[in-house]
Image (cartoon, helix red, strand yellow):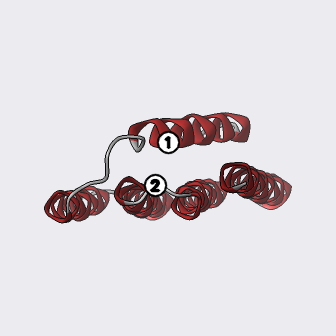
Amino acid sequence: MTRFPLNRWIALLGCSAALAVAQAAGPAMSKEDAAAEKARIEADYKAQRTACDSLSGNAKDICVEEAKGKEKVAKAELDYKREANAKNEGKVAEARAEATYAVAKERCDDLAGDQKDVCVKEAKAAKSKAEANAKATRKSTAG
């Protein structure tokens, strides 16, 4: 199995955060719209999770982590759409960092020995960098 370079994960994370901010810049959502969106997010998670059941081994574990991550990020984005502030923007970035880390770490399980150790260290470094960027963004938007 080939590894997806972590620098691509970081770039994807940054692009996704920028897209979330751009999408959330509109007016606040009504409670009904938010409830419908939350139900859609949960239905999407269940469908993705069910699709993972056809897999086995580490591929299934990766699939499950991806589904969980997408759900957490989508819920954080929903909170930001409902109330666009620095705190919720930070939660989106943190959810993205955590989801990316969880998937990257799970992908490392396909490796062994030193390769696995290096992979896990790279995943942790990417997570730390993403969290630091989120913190910096939160400070710049709050101040």
Write the residue at 32% across / 59% down. 52
Observer-side mark, 2 or 1, equals: 2
> Where residue 23 appears, x then y in whole percent?
39, 38
Does dot 1 land on a helix, a strand or a loop?
Answer: helix
Q: State the residue position of label 2.
A: 84
> Where residue 110 appears, x then y in whole percent?
62, 55
Say which label, 2 or 1, has the lower sequence index: 1
Tell me which corner region of the image, top left, top right, bottom left or bottom right, holds residue 47. bottom left
Q: Is residue 70 above or below residue 12?
A: below
Which of the two residues, 113 or 67, is positioned nearer the viewer here? Answer: 67
Q: State the residue position of label 1.
A: 21
Does dot 2 land on a helix, a strand or a loop?
Answer: loop
Q: In which quadrant will I find the C terminus?
A: bottom right
Residue 79, numbered label: none
Write the residue at 35% across / 57% down. 78
Q: Do tag 2 and tag 1 residues touch (Cβ < 8 Å)? A: no
Q: Is residue 3 above or below residue 63?
A: above
Callout 2, which amino acid?
Answer: Ala
Callout 1, which amino acid?
Answer: Val
Which of the two residues, 134 or 3, is positioned nearer the viewer here? Answer: 134
